[in-house]
């Protein structure tokens, strides 16, 4: 299948695609506390694959006081902070060597819950488009999300049930022990695509028949490596991604007033 052929399966990330991005909460926190933008994401990415964040998303540890303490330590790692400052200096050389500023103090537990709070809200462009895709019945719809498991009885647990109802299958990292961009999680998604196709009496789905939407480049690279087609969803630009989906699917996925502005 060439890139301009209609896909058979659509595979969605959740945070930053179907719901608002937790990255916005991170940026808001950084700006409000005079922390250089990008530091939190740098810290999280550089502690992979066994930082507290990654272990939580694989379901290796519980969301408890130990997790928050570990997350706090990761966000205030002096060695990583020095690397981040060097990266900033490399991008903006001044010719003089200034001392590394102190590691910023971050309330990791507050930041975490702000990220979770923001990412509860359905995206105003992508979520309605997802519903229209489901109503069309023309595609196998899957979710592939790096997730967390909230404590028993926590109200946020209900959000997962609502999200699952929009898809033919839902792969959650914290429930499977696999986390993007591990190749095994894309293989699991393709197996589920084929399971649904078989249930519908359809032929085999190949990786190239699937378009994967995500807001993180590393995850998209993983999908490409698995043979899938990809669509990058940029922060605050989900409407652009919906337009691309319209081109790929041949369906009108935006409300009439939005479509008129194309």
Image (spheres, rainbow, N blue to C red):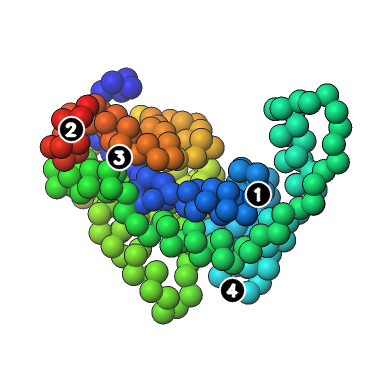
Q: CA distance from mark 3 to mark 1?
A: 37 Å
Quarter placement of the C terminus: top left
Q: CA distance from mark 4 to mark 1?
A: 26 Å
Label 1: which residue? 35
Label 2: which residue? 259
Foreground mark, 2 or 3?
Answer: 2
| Residue 197 in which image quadrant | top left
Q: Secondary structure at mark 1?
A: loop
For the residues bearing labels 2 and 3, Cβ distance under 8 angstroms: no
Q: CA distance from mark 2 to mark 3?
A: 21 Å
Label 4: which residue? 64
For the residues bearing labels 4 and 1, Cβ distance under 8 angstroms: no
Q: Which residue occupies 30% across, 36% down?
A: 239
Question: Residue 11: where, in percent of width, then height?
Answer: 34, 42
For the residues bearing labels 4 and 2, Cβ distance under 8 angstroms: no
Give the number of the disc on residue 10.
Answer: 3
User: Of label 3 and label 1, which has the lower sequence position?
Assistant: 3
Q: Secondary structure at mark 3?
A: strand
Front in this rendered view, residue 259 or 30 = 30
């Amino acid at each position: 299948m060439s890139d301009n052929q209609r896909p058979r399966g659509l595979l969605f990330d959740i945070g930053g695609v179907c719901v608002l991005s937790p990255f916005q909460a991170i940026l808001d926190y950084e700006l409000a506390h005079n922390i250089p933008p990008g530091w939190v994401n740098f810290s999280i990415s550089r502690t992979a694959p066994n930082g507290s964040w990654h272990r939580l998303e694989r379901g290796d540890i519980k969301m408890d006081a130990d997790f928050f303490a570990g997350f706090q330590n990761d966000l205030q790692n002096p060695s990583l902070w020095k690397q981040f400052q060097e990266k900033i200096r490399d991008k903006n050389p001044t010719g003089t060597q200034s001392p590394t500023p102190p590691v910023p103090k971050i309330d990791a537990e507050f930041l975490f819950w702000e990220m979770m709070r923001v990412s509860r809200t359905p995206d105003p462009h992508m979520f309605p488009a997802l519903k229209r895709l489901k109503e069309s019945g023309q595609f196998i719809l899957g979710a592939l999300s790096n997730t967390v498991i909230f404590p028993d009885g926590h109200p946020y647990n209900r959000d997962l049930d609502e999200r699952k109802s929009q898809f033919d299958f839902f792969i959650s990292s914290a429930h499977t022990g696999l986390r993007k961009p591990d190749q095994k999680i894309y293989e699991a998604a393709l197996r589920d695509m084929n399971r649904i196709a078989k249930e519908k009496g359809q032929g085999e789905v190949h990786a190239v028949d699937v378009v994967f939407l995500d807001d993180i480049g590393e995850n998209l690279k993983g999908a490409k490596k698995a043979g899938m087609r990809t669509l990058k969803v940029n922060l605050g630009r989900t409407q652009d991604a919906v337009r691309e989906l319209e081109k790929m699917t041949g369906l009108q996925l935006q409300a009439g007033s939005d479509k008129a502005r194309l």
